[in-house]
Each structure stands twice: as C-alpha cells, then as structure tokens.
Image (cartoon, helix red, strand yellow):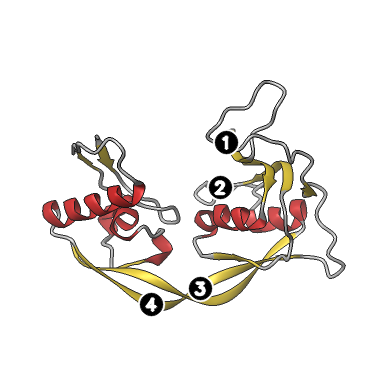
Amino acid sequence: ADVTIGPIGPNGPGMFGGTAGALPTFQLSGAPDWINTVAYDIQATTSDAGITPGRMRAMLRAMLADRFKMTTRVEQREVPAYELRIARSDRRLGAQLTETRAADCIPPPAKPEPQQLQCGIGQSFDGAMYRLRAVNVPMTLLSTRLQPLVGRPVIDQTGLGGGYDFIDFRFTPPTAAPAPNEVSVITALREQLGLVLEPRREILDVLVIDHI
C-alpha cells in the first residue's frame, strides 16, 4: 500500500495526530507549527491485502516513530467543547431540518439506482460557500461532521432520535477570507436548521507529542 503524509489544517483531522492516536487535532498537543505547512510523502508497502484501518494506523505510528523519531503519550485533559441543542424553547426546528422522508435510502458504500437516494451527508463547495445535504442522518452524525468545522468536540444533546434531512445547508468555510455576506457555521445552524452550539467542558484523551 502507498501512504502519503501531508500537512494538516488547524481544525481538521491530521495525519500526524490521526495516525499516532486516531485523534482529531483538537485532541493534539505539543505539535510543532511546521506540521501545518510542511508536507512529506512516505512510501510504504504491506503484504496484508485485508489490512484494517486500526492496523494501518498502528503501522503508520511505528513508521513515524522510526523515521521522524516521534514519541507520544495519551493523557486525559479537560478541553473546550460544544453541545448541539435545539434553539427554540418550543423545540420547533428550522425550515430546512425535517424528519427523514427517505428511510429507504441506500447506505454507503452501496451505490443507489437512479431513482434512489444515498443515505448520509454529502458536501460541495462553490468557491465561496460550503453546501451540505443530508439524507436520513442521525444528530450524532451531524455532531461528528461539525467537529472539524468548529475545532471542538460536539456532543449531541438535541434529544432527536431517528434520521433527519436537510437539502441546502450553506455556510462560509472557517478558513475563508472575511466577506460582507459571510455566514458562519454557528449562525447557519441557528437560522437554517434551528440548532445551536452551547459551550461546555469535556474530559477527553489528548495525544501529547513529546518529540518529533
């Protein structure tokens, strides 16, 4: 298998943090600034055709320790987080967020037929705005997808069970240059989906890089 290790962004999951501990970067501590800007290509092979993601992460972690002399440890820390909640006290949802109408959608990785819908969250980018579309998505999955956008853990506290749809959830990506019509993901959540992110503290495993 060929493996490429590249730069990581400030909010998204990164190869150094992800491979070393399967953690997003908000659970990464002690990383030098250059891992956000310097890219490396590491070529590796394995004879295990059915290698699992967990086994691949373990192999990459060993590779990083060997080639970059990286040493790490995992410790529990209290970190800033968000709770995902319904914005209105009467629990009325935003106009775009509806209980799923496509319970018979096709879950990935299977491909739907022309008249069928794919379950899950899809995204596109038109150069100015991100657009997300969800079909039969639980709030726990939406919470997970929000994490790299806000740079914090997001815990579902909506109390909404089952699947939900939204067709055109639009917001300005957090890395984009400021613009007059900018819509942050937090503002878009409230105005389009009727959801809010409320700050809290959470104790999580944090990957500490002692040396690299």
Q: Give the mark nearer the N terminus: 3 vs 2.
A: 3
Q: Secondary structure at mark 3?
A: strand
Given residues 174 and 49, the one toward you in this image is 49
Look at mark 4 in the image and give the residue it sits on: 76
Please, what is the three-letter code of the amino acid marked with disc 3? Pro
Q: Is 25 positioned to the left or the right of 74 in the image?
A: right
Query: Distance of mark 2 from mark 1, alpha carbons?
Result: 9 Å
Residue on which the image places disc 3 = 80
Residue 120 position within the rendered picture, expressed as x and y whole percent measured from the top left:
62, 42
Tell me, for residue 125, which label it has, or none: 1
Kindly report the distance in space between the C-alpha atoms of the residues bearing marks 4 and 3.
13 Å
Mark nearest the camera among 2 and 4 is: 4
Q: Which mark is residue 33?
A: none
Residue ID for mark 2: 173
Under circle 1, the secondary element is strand
Type of amino acid under label 1 = Phe
Foreground: disc 4 or disc 3: 4
* CB contact under 8 Å: marks 2 and 4: no
Pointer 2 with pointer 1, Cβ within 8 A: yes
Q: Position of residue 39 (x, y in %)?
A: 25, 44
Is residue 196 visible in the rendered image? The answer is yes
Mark toward the start of the polypeptide (2 vs 1): 1
Which quadrant of the figure contains the C terminus? Answer: bottom left
Q: Are marks 1 and 4 in contact (CB under 8 Å)?
A: no
| Residue that appears at 71% across and 65% down | 158
